[in-house]
């Protein structure tokens, strides 16, 4: 990927507030902004992970109960 391509993508991420930047002399440092990323996770992925977690918990309980009965 070219330097221009990287700079273009970083600018888009910065405009979307997914990264923050800080200048240090001639260097521009980029950092992930966890707040909007967490919001995206909660809105799009969180509702599915709760169902999976409860299903895994139920499976664990069933397996432990069947193991105890043996």
Image (cartoon, grey):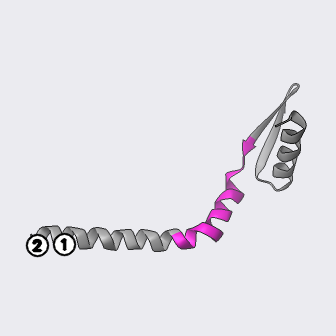
Q: Position of residue 4 (x, y in %)?
A: 90, 37
Label at residue 69: 2
Residue 51 against residue 4 in the figure, above or below = below
Give the quadrant of residue 1.
Answer: top right
- The span picked out in magenta is 31-48
Q: Position of residue 37 (x, y in %)?
A: 68, 57
Q: Main secondary structure of the magenta part?
A: helix
| Total number of numbered discs in the rendering | 2
Residue 23 against residue 15 in the figure, above or below = above
Residue at 83%, 40% (x, y): give it.
Answer: 6
Q: Nearer the viewer, residue 68 or 14?
A: 68
Q: Is residue 57 shown left or right of residue 9? A: left
Q: Which residue is at the far front?
A: 1
Residue at 39%, 73% (x, y): give it.
Answer: 55
Residue holding disc 1: 65
> Dot 2, crowdedness within 10 Å: few (<14), some or many (≥20)?
few
Q: CA distance from mark 1 to mark 2?
A: 6 Å
Q: Nearer the viewer, residue 35 or 16?
A: 16
Label at residue 28: none
What kind of element bears circle 1? helix
Residue at 81%, 41% (x, y): give it.
Answer: 21
> CB of mark 1 within 8 Å of CB of mark 2?
yes
Is residue 8 within the magenta segment? no
Q: Position of residue 51 (x, y in %)?
A: 47, 74
Q: Position of residue 22 (x, y in %)?
A: 81, 37
Q: Nearer the viewer, residue 2 or 41?
A: 2
The C terminus, quarter of image: bottom left
Give the quadrant of residue 30.
Answer: top right
What kind of element bears circle 2? helix
């Amino acid at each position: 990927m070219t330097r221009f391509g990287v700079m273009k993508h970083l600018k888009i991420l910065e405009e979307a507030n997914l990264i923050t930047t800080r200048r240090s002399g001639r260097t521009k440092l980029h950092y992930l902004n966890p707040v909007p990323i967490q919001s995206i996770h909660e809105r799009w992925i969180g509702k599915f992970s709760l169902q999976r977690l409860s299903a895994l918990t139920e499976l664990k309980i069933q397996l432990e109960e069947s193991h105890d009965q043996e």
